[in-house]
Image: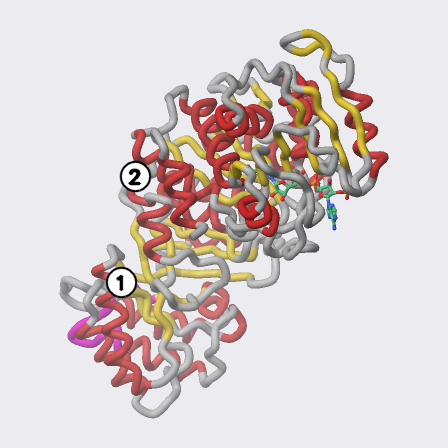
Amino acid sequence: MSRVTLVAVSLALGRTQDVTDALARAARARDGGADLVEWRLDAIADEPGGTEAALRLCRESPLPCIVTVRSHDEGGLYEGDEAQRLALLDAVGRGDHPPAYIDFEFASMRASANRRLKLMLAVDHPGPIRTGEPRLILSSHDFATRPPNLLQTIVAMWADEACTVAKIAWRGRSLRDNLEVFDILADRLKPTIALCMGEFGLPSRVLAGKFGGFLTFARGDDEPGTAPGQPGLAELLQHYRFRSITECTSVYGVVGWPLGHSHSPRLHNAAFESSGHDGVYLPLPIPPEWEHFKATVGSFIAQRRLNFRGASVTAPHKEHLARFVSEHGGTLDEMTTICGAANTLVVEESGALRAHNTDAPAVLDCLAPMLGRTSDDLRGVRALVLGAGGAGRSAAAALAQAGAAVCIANRTRSRAEAVAAALNGRPGTHGEMRVSAVEWTNAANCACFQGIVNCTVLGMAGGPAPDESPLEDDAPLDGVVVLDSVYAPRLTPLVKQSLLRGAKVVEGLAMFAAQAERQFALWTGQAPPRGQFAEQLAGLCR
Ligand code: NAP
């Protein structure tokens, strides 16, 4: 049952007067690459002139169309008379320009034999077969949760002789619901649309083609869409390269909570495209608790036909990743072992797991050249790390391993002391690592550091103190290399202060690009496209 998965743009009409505008929206969707348009007529079906509007939409539609009047019971806006809904569908079905498909809810059809008959007359004309006759998408929706009778419903829809295409959609409760969508599609008995709605459902929409789904829905660009979680058309086709996804495509993603508007999908998808790597990279929101992380990542890896081959892992899951890979008999790179935290998961073709920490070497990639040194030899350098969270620990470990003498300062001093205690005296590349905790207040005022790395959230847009720098106004910075790991905004208070006070500044974007490049190389075995990550990030964070 292999076929190309279609892209349908769903367009709702608010008033019968909006037909001309709706046709223009559909023409834009056609020009943007859509295959079908779904006319959502919930709001106009029982308005005066509703049927005429529907007939005109079908007649002048720039794309083959689906006509849907979604009932309120299944998340639509239609609360009118059922006979009127059927009359409209009957009229478009029997019209001179019938739609390619009529969508009707399975539950509504089952509720009445009379309704069934009427609908069948609309979608299946008696008499000689005419080209362009509408066929029935039999659908079932749950906007609240996964329906308890999900599998019985889909099997019953497949078994119904009236059903040309079965559609089942529910609000995903977690990423794991996508895996059930993939199973339904892969095991389908008839052409099937299966998807999860809401913030967890994007994989089901983007990967519909990988599992042979009949179609996926997109919203018109700059339109609100007709169901939660629909990607924009351009996002689906250009950013996620929907048309190039096949059953062989490898799947990657960024795991975190919350993910907000992570730049990682844009960067990695573009890099996969320019390097010819057959992969797609998705946002993968997983709630903060270890149990969620373990269950979700475990089930993604276990579903072998998904080809889940890796992830970028961000707060609050970096320690969870190190634990997960360790508990599953995988390998941890040296920085992950030292820091107890990783930001990169690699899933080998054999299923073997690896955890890497690319934050740590990224600090060296950025700092060493500015210090006139190589990443593996920072002997004689004195460095100050501000912050003792995941990034601070990675920065301190990387710098100390390369031979720098590291001081670490943190608002909560005990955390800095714990990092120092864990690292100081461990074997590094050039002898024992040297890491000591210092006071947070005036940490940089001794004027003895050649390098300062901010690994706190101070200055971060949307963080607790976006207007604050971690350094005192009068901190001596002349000639010092300052790396601010915060990358949104680009011009953080610390970056501005450092520029004004004569420091050599490395923006957080450079570190972000460096750690992402290393992830790309780990997943693909290829050198990252030269300069592409940094260039793209600069464009995104202008
Ligand atoms: P984290 O583990 O949550 O650590 C947060 C750090 O910020 C802690 O040291 C914390 O100190 C400190 N902090 C929070 N609020 C503060 C305040 N009001 N005043 C002073 N210090 C405060 O986070 P993380 O993963 O290490 O990330 C830290 C920063 O690094 C973030 O801005 C992140 O975006 C950035 N980062 C950038 C990259 C990159 O590639 N550019 C990579 C990784 C991380 P306490 O211990 O006292 O709470």
Name the spot of residue 246 as percent of width and height, x first. Answer: 33, 36
Q: Residues within 10 Å of mark 2 (few under 14, many from 20)?
A: some
In the image, ligand 1 is in what quadrant?
top right
Taking depth in this image into account, of 351 and 457 the one nearest to the observer is 457
Instruction: Say how many tags the image has.
Output: 2
**Ligand 1 has an atom within 8 Å of the beta carbon of the residue at disc 1:** no
Q: Give the secondary structure at mark 1.
A: helix
Q: CA distance from mark 2 to mark 1?
A: 19 Å
Q: Is residue 425 left or right of residue 25?
A: right
Name the spot of residue 404 as percent of width and height, x first. Answer: 65, 19
Q: Which residues are magenta?
A: 92-102
* Rendering colour mode: secondary structure
**Disc 2 vs disc 1: Cβ atoms closer than 8 Å?**
no
Name the spot of residue 190 as percent of width and height, x first. Answer: 36, 47
Q: Residue at x 46, y 35 (%)?
A: 513
Q: Residue at x 65, y 53 (%)?
A: 463
Residue under pointer 2: 244
Give the quadrant of residue 418. top right
- The residue type indicated by label 2 comes to Ser
Residue under pointer 1: 29
Name the spot of residue 327 as percent of width and height, x first. Answer: 70, 21
Residue 279 numbered tag = none
**Ligand 1 has an atom within 8 Å of the beta carbon of the residue at disc 2:** no
- Residue 60 visible at all: yes
Q: Quadrant of the N terminus?
A: top left
Q: Does the magenta-highlighted stretch encompass residue 504?
A: no
